[in-house]
Image (cartoon, rainbow, N blue to C red):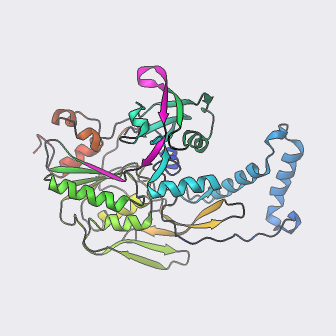
Amino acid sequence: MNRMWKIVAGLVVLMMVASASLGVGVVIGGSGLLPLWGANADDAPDEFAVFWQAWDIVHRNFVDRSALDPQSLTYGAIRGMVAALGDEGHTAFLTPEEIERQQSNLSGTFTGIGAQLGVRDALPVIIAPFDGSPAYEAGVRAGDIIMKVDGEDVTTMQLNDIVAKIRGPEGTVVVLSLLRPDENRSLDVSITRGEIKIPAASWAMIPGTDVALIRLSQFSANALDDVKESIEGAKDAGAEVLIVDVRNNPGGLLEQAVSVTSQFLSDGDVLLEEDASGARKAYAVERGGLATDLPLVVLINPGSASSAEIFAGAIEDHERGHVVGETTFGTGTVLQPYSLRDGSALLLGTKQWLTPKGRLIRKQGIEPDVEVILPIEADLLTPLELETMTVEELLDSEDAQLLKALEVLGQLPGGE
């Protein structure tokens, strides 16, 4: 996967597109209507006076009358309020359409082309196509800039609007007009949409070693099954050491974070959950993990968020293995969904997560015990690439974090 996409933008997109995890830590079944004061603005609290004054000025004087859509303006105001809370990348406002996409994303299955989207230099870009997806089969590459969708210029559109245009019913065709910077050429790619099952985890043996790399891309509903399958496959292939890669992993479901982390720990807690009053609840390790005794390194970077931070923090606190890379994003709140009257919703952070030793994740992140900083454009090696890679190609790769992990484990080919 290419790191050319900007980390913050990438996180937002990953939470809204194919590897989306807007529901990281969502408390299932907790919905309700927010209190409203009625239709008369005069009934509103005094602090809303300036808002209604601004609303009135806009409606009386803005030159483009077609832009004065009440729903769009209301949604914009709500998004601004949510952004002011500072729970970046987590607490969110969702339209009805975004709620539907979120639900399909967290299930690990959706209909589309099978690619992660991001933003680079204010332009929509392909972060990476999923292995074997329609986008992958059509020749879409990481780093391709999306100029048009079905002939319509999308370079100035919001990313969620581009996603909505690209997604569609299974069996239908979408045409992407792409700019490929590394080849300095443009091309049109026709892609037949299909049902996409997002692999939460994949694995491969690292050439010249007894180490298996398990790439954990998200904590969706299928994460535990995929991780267990990866561990079992790695063991059967002779792996004696594991590297678990949660770089650019935006998170997912809390229950999956607990179950997946428990595959690598034998006892203790996975995390602590703290409410607004300071009361804490511990989430204990689930017994029966498949990889509790294999030497382990975890790879992290600024794109690792939420459930990925729970995982890395637990491994670090239990001194189960080294954590290599860069400090994570710092997102750690439990999202309580509140349904609004028109079918939209607020996902509001009502609790926060701490590591087993009580370290706050929100706004702090997880610091690696072995820091290796990579430039934004460096390529991160994936299991798919490792399957056909020689030892020489591995050692010549840009992925210094993976190479450092092998060095820490005493498994660097040709090393001491």
Q: Quadrant of residue 376?
A: top left
Residues 379 and 100: in front is 100
Magenta-span inclusion, residue 187: yes
Q: Quadrant of residue 220?
A: bottom left
Question: Is residue 112 visible in this depiction of the protein?
Answer: yes
Question: Is residue 89 visible in this depiction of the protein?
Answer: no
Residues 326 and 392: in front is 392
Residues 241 and 400: in front is 241
Q: Is residue 56 above or below residue 186?
A: below
**Residue at 82 percent of width and 40 percent of height:** 66
Q: Position of residue 292 (x, y in %)?
A: 22, 66
Q: Is residue 210 above or below residue 138?
A: below
**Residue at 63 percent of width and 34 percent of height:** 156
Q: Position of residue 374 (x, y in %)?
A: 35, 41
User: Which residue occupies the extreme front position in the image?
Assistant: 171
**Residue at 44 percent of width and 47 percent of height:** 196
Q: Position of residue 149 (x, y in %)?
A: 57, 32
Image quadrant where one finds the C terminus? top left
The magenta stretch is 179-203
Relative to residue 285, is residue 129 drawn left or right?
right
Q: Is residue 303 above or below residue 388?
A: below
Relative to residue 249, is residue 165 drawn left or right?
right
Image quadrant where one finds the N terminus? top left
Q: Position of residue 414 (x, y in %)?
A: 11, 40
Q: Main secondary structure of the magenta part?
A: strand
Relative to residue 370, is residue 135 drawn left or right?
right
Magenta-span inclusion, residue 100: no
Residues 101 and 3: in front is 101
Relative to residue 134, is residue 80 drawn left or right?
right
